[in-house]
Amino acid sequence: MDSLTGRVVLLATGGTIASRADGVGGATVAADAGSAVLAAAGTGAVEVDVVDLMQKGSYLLTFDDMLTVCAAIRAALVSPLALGVVVTHGTDTMEETAYLADLLHDDPRPVIFTGAQRAADSSDPDGPENLRAAITLAASPEARGRGALIVFDGEVLTLPGTRKIETTELRAFGNPDLGPAGSITPTGEFLLAPASRRPAPLNAPSSGAGIRVDIVACYPGADAALFVAACAAGARGIVLEATGLGNANAALSNAVRDAVQDGVVVVTSTRVHAGPVRGVYGAGGGRTLEDAGAVPSGLLRPSQARTLLQALLTLGLPIEQVVHQIRQRGDPTLLLPVKPT
């Protein structure tokens, strides 16, 4: 592994990697500062600057909190001495914040997200090893040009399509369609697959305040009440967590048609673990939804489809551009690694 001269910036946001039992009711809460998280891991030969950004469980984050993390990443990379950035983050919504960072990232230097499944005061915490691996990768020239990545339990994952797949097991994240982008050992040796294509980064929104984007689940017997309620609450975008290839029913399809005519952007995703969303079935299925104006999310599951949709709507892009971006960024053929020539 080649080395560069400089330092890694660690942005600490809380999460399980920084959590301890509160000593009152026994609940686990984010408590450790970034310096304590780093001290537990060690840095080896890499110099690390620590920035305490927030101290939250990621289940508490808002879209504006996610934008704050992205702004801090940009600020950290202003310095030419910064080799890359590591973000310690709760696992619950890491797939959303890291994906937003990837969407906005316009610098070749790597941004690595990591965290833990076991709290800092557990008998065998996994955070220190994850953080050491993330720092190693952030400092390496081989990780440049890959956007934001997640490093967790020895695996390296690109963001589109990556999601939390386990509530308690140490291998918390997976990318069922694309697989891992590489691996890294406890001693810092890593292997990376060829880089995937990267669409042009989005501009960074200043705030997501006032832009409501909801997720509405489909299930046997579902009517359009929750979908209509989301529209009535002011949603400018709705992601349908549909079944199968992206199917709903006639009532929801009719509601989608009305919402699209009113200027609401509707994206169809799926509750299924893997595979693309495609409009195949009629009578309220995915083909009917597409005919009603819904946009299939490709390989993006509801969490990331919502993140992308909110970012695009917050930027104030015309609906035609929003639709184009969703189709492009979820397209399975564009997410595959580039074959070396």
Image: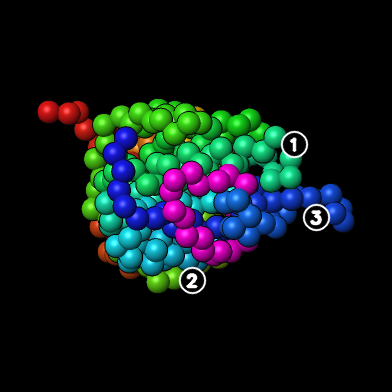
Query: Residue 123 shows which numbered tag?
Result: 1
Q: CA distance from mark 3 to mark 1?
A: 16 Å
Residues in magenta?
Answer: 40-61
Q: CA distance from mark 2 to mark 1?
A: 41 Å
Q: Which residue is mark 2?
A: 209
Q: Position of residue 269 (x, y in %)?
A: 44, 40
Q: Is residue 297 above or below residue 273?
A: below
Query: Residue 22 shows which numbered tag?
Result: 3
Q: Position of residue 238 (x, y in %)?
A: 46, 53
Outermost residue toward the right in this view: 24
Check disc 1 and report its element: helix, strand or loop. loop
Check disc 3 and report its element: helix, strand or loop. loop
Q: CA distance from mark 2 to mark 3?
A: 32 Å
The answer to whether one can see residue 59 in this image is: no
| Amino acid type, residue under disc 1 in the picture | Ser
**Few, some or many residues within 10 Å of mark 1 (<14, 14–19, 20+):** few
Q: Is residue 14 above or below residue 65?
A: above
Q: Earlier in the sequence, mark 2 or mark 1?
A: 1
In the shown orientation, is residue 113 left or right of residue 202? right
Q: Is residue 126 above or below residue 318?
A: above
Check disc 2 and report its element: helix, strand or loop. loop
The answer to whether residue 163 is magenta is no
Identify which residue is drawn at 53% across, 44% down.
Answer: 131
Q: Closer to the observer: label 3 or label 1?
A: 1
Instruction: Residue 330: name its quadrant.
Output: top left
- Quadrant placement of the N terminus: top left
The answer to whether residue 46 is magenta is yes
State the colouring used for the structure image: rainbow
Identify which residue is drawn at 38% across, 67% down.
Answer: 75
Outermost residue toward the front in this view: 45
Q: Earlier in the sequence, mark 2 or mark 3?
A: 3
